[in-house]
Structure formats: C-alpha cells, structure tokens
Amino acid sequence: MVLTQLNTFVRIVDAGGITRAAEQLGLTQPAVTKQLRALESDFSAPLVVRKGRHIILTPAGEVLYHHARRMQNLVDQAYEAVQEINRPGQGEIRVGAVSTVALFTLPRVLSSFTQEFPGVRVHVHIGEIQQALDGVIRGDLAVAITTVPIVHPQVESIPLFSDPVRLVVAPSRRDLLPSRLELADLAKLEFISYQYPSRFRSFIDGVLEQQGVIPRVLMEFNSHEVVKSMVKVGLGVAMVPDSVAREDIDQGHLIALEVSGLPPIQRTTSFLVAKEPHRSHPLQAMMRTVFNHYQVPPNLWPHWYRSQSNAEPSSFN
C-alpha cells in the first residue's frame, strides 16, 4: 500500500496537481487526496502546499519525492532484470541528451546500436545539461551525453571527444572582412549568438572577455542550428561547435575563420552514467557501443565495467 501511495505522490508532483494526477491514474480526486493524506500521516509532516489548482512541495515533500523516484526506478529495474532472464537480447534503455548531441552526435551512435542490438528499445530524452545530470542521478536515465564534462560524486563522467568551437561566416560575407582577422576586429563584427543565459553563451563570452573582446550581438537564438542558418544567409558571424558546423564547412556553405591571437576554444562531449548503476544488459550494450564508436581507452571506463569479466554483453549476440 505504501508503494502505491508513493507512486501516487510522484504522479501528483509530476502532473502539477491532484486533479490532473487523478485523471492520469484513472482515480477520483478524493481517492488521490486520501492517499496523499495517508502519506503525510505516516511521515508526520505536510508534503505539499496547495496554491490554487497547483501544489508546491514542502522541504519534507522534496526529500520524499527524491526517494520515491528512486524507489520507482528500483522497481522498474527489478522488473527489467526478471524480464531479461526470459527475454535475452531484449529490453529498453533511456538515454538523455542535450539538443546539440541529439541532432549531430547521437544519430550515428544509435544507428550502430540498433544494428547490433535490434531487440533493445531506446528512449531518448532531450533537455538541458542539468536535466540530463538529474535524470542520471535519480535513475530516470540510464546514461546521458552532454557537451561538457560533469563533476558529481554520484556520476561517472567519461570524455568522448573534443569539440572545437569555430568562428564561421557565410561565403558571401567573407570578402567584406579583413583578410587577416585580429582580436580587435572581433569587436566590430555583428554576432549571431546562442541565447543568454546558457552554459555555451557564458563559456564563449567568458573566453572573449578574457581576450578583451565584447561581442556586438545582433540576434540570439536557443538553437545552434538556427544560429547557423542565420549566418548562412549572411546576417553575421557566429561561434558554433565544430560538430554543428563541420558538414556545412566541408560543403562550402560556411567558412571557418582564423583569428590571430585567439586561443583554441573547445568543449568536451562527455558520457554520463551513475557510479553504481543497475548493470542491465541494455546498459552494458550501450556503453560498449559508445566506447567502441569513440575509441574510449579502457583506463577511462568505470571501474565496475572494466573489472567484470563479462563486460561484453554476449547474451545480446
């Protein structure tokens, strides 16, 4: 009964209120309210505060929600582990990714994965870096790929590849710029930038400011793809990751500019997994695919993955 009440509590929080949670669960509103009251009685603490039709978690509610989500994931993992016995080679895995990774990095990885492990369903959740980290910590996500390394006591962050940041311009505008760009020239250019605030924007602005450059931002967007599109039609220059611009540079749709005196700028795309994850076959299969694809050396693998003799998920072959 307590597990049912905890599941209902999580649904209330995720749905943003009792009424919507009741609709999703197929229960009456009084029945959902009764379960919530029972939990509050058991824990001798109020868990939510009602604000109109919405609810706000109390400090006790925040703590319980975190543990309830972990319990849900443990139950799901137990179910998956039992199913793996009866259905070797099958299963599912939840992967988190930021939008840049989902657009330009993940497709090739998933293509290799689905060819080698066709019985595994992959659920990709696209969000911000913090959402990916939180998902791995809670167990909502088995793994995540982010555009920066993460330092957290509950998470392994494994570097996959360095992604240089390029200053790009449309071919039609290249002749309008000095043949040799200096740092001082950057302050005169009109930039199409990633939106502020964001990690990428703060990172780029910080590097430029260290070199004494305050960029003139003409437009800003929340998508590298849109930023790149604006540059391609000649609206300005932009700093974009090489993974985003490489194909257009190779095809001549964009030109990468070198700036004298500007140090190399790059990010490190990284693979996140919990330090003590549920070691399911789908997880090990995904790790094998990613590590093989990016040729990650064994000394960077998580210790449990490196040390176990059956790190190769042979049951999927």
Image (cartoon, grey):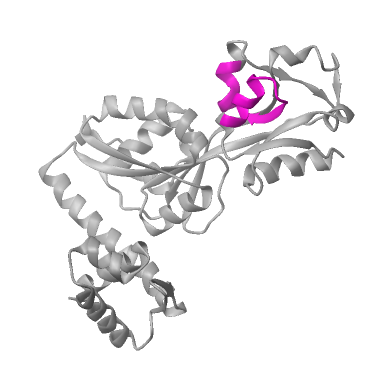
Which residue: 55% across, 29% down? 225
Residue nearest the viewer, comparing 307 with 192: 192
Judged left or right of residue 12, residue 89 is left
Residue 311 visible from this viewpoint: no
Q: Is residue 144 above or below residue 138?
A: above
Is 238 in the magenta? yes
Residue nearest the viewer, comparing 107 with 137: 107
Which residue: 38% across, 48% down? 304
Which residue: 42% across, 33% down? 291
Magenta range: 226-248
Judged left or right of residue 180, residue 38 is left
Q: Return the x and y of residue 146 as percentages of the image width and height.
A: 51, 42
Q: Is residue 265 above or below residue 198?
A: above
Residue nearest the viewer, comparing 31 with 295: 31
Quarter location, residue 265:
top right
Quarter location, residue 79:
bottom left
Judged left or right of residue 110, residue 215 is right
Which residue: 66% across, 38% down? 220
Q: Return the x and y of residue 177 as percentages of the image width and height.
A: 82, 17
Q: Residue furthest front?
A: 52
Q: Main secondary structure of the magenta part?
A: helix
Q: Quadrant of the C terminus?
A: top left
Q: Return the x and y of residue 77 as percentages of the image width and height.
A: 25, 55
Residue nearest the viewer, comparing 114 with 239: 239
Q: Quadrant of the N terminus?
A: bottom left
Q: Return the x and y of residue 132 as percentages of the image width and height.
A: 46, 49
Q: Is residue 10 above or below residue 264?
A: below
Residue 33 visible from this viewpoint: yes
Is 125 in the magenta? no
